[in-house]
Image: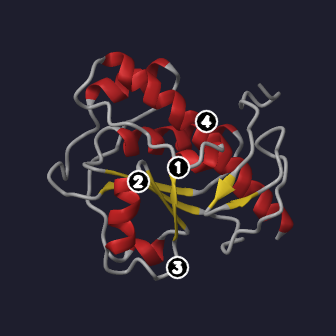
Amino acid sequence: MTKAGFPKTRMVTFSGSTDRARTGPWSCCRTRSPFPTDRVRLLFVCTGNICRSPTAHAVARTRLSAVGLDWQVDSAGTGGWHAGEAPDERAARAGAARGHDFSGLSAREVEPDDFSRFDHIIAMDRSHLRDLRAMPGAGRGAQISLMMDWAGETGVDVPDPYYGGEDGFDRVLSMIERSVDGLIGQLRCDQSKG
């Protein structure tokens, strides 16, 4: 763990390119974000927006607040069948046990305008990544990536805990925490290179 409470990160690979290893979330890499503005806009996406993506949303809010960053964070689903619903209680309980607040979150479906409203759209698994890339508006500017790539675990899916037990929500939360730490570290580094 670093002094800021973030775990040390590993090698990060995106689309076949490898960045040098980092020793913490604020250690800089060679790549540069196409969106070097101070207020980064993040959208996390899963299937119905009640388990994985709201977990990422809550974790990102917690981590960003801890380091004083005012970035825009949202979450959505590739489908709208849970629109307006609160996150799954099991996800909220697992998150609350680690200090993450799910209050105010409600499910919504990804919209074509999201591709121009957000700098980064992060998919929880490869099926979401495919769905996002096939959606109208996908070429409008947002960088679409896979969640675990930000943790240096290239091509790894965050599994859907919905049909399993409480331990699945804890496992998913741990994966998401690693990824969010890597995401913030990489984007913060990119901003410092301005």
Dot label at residue 155: 1
Whole-percent x, y for residue 45 in the image: 38, 54
SS type, badge 4 = helix
- The residue lying at 41 percent from left, 60 percent from top is 129
Quadrant containing the N terminus is top right
Q: Residue at x 22, y 28 (%)?
A: 163
Mark 3: amino acid: Gly
The numbered disc on residue 141 is 3
Q: Residues within 10 Å of mark 2 (few under 14, many from 20)?
A: some
Residue 126, numbered label: 2
In this orientation, which residue lies closer to the viewer: 23 or 51?
23
Q: CA distance from mark 1 to mark 3?
A: 22 Å
Q: How many marks?
A: 4
Residue at the far left in the pictured view: 81
Left or right: 37 in relation to 129: right
- Seen at 70% across and 69% down, the residue is 33
**Residue 78, image x and y in percent?**
28, 59
Vertical side of 158 occupied by 6: above or below: above
Task: Give the Cα separation between the discs numbered 2 and 1.
Answer: 8 Å
Q: Is residue 64 visible?
A: no
Q: CA distance from mark 3 to mark 4?
A: 26 Å
Point out residue 93 in the picture as x, y percentages from the top left corner.
Answer: 36, 21
Residue 178: mark in rendering: 4
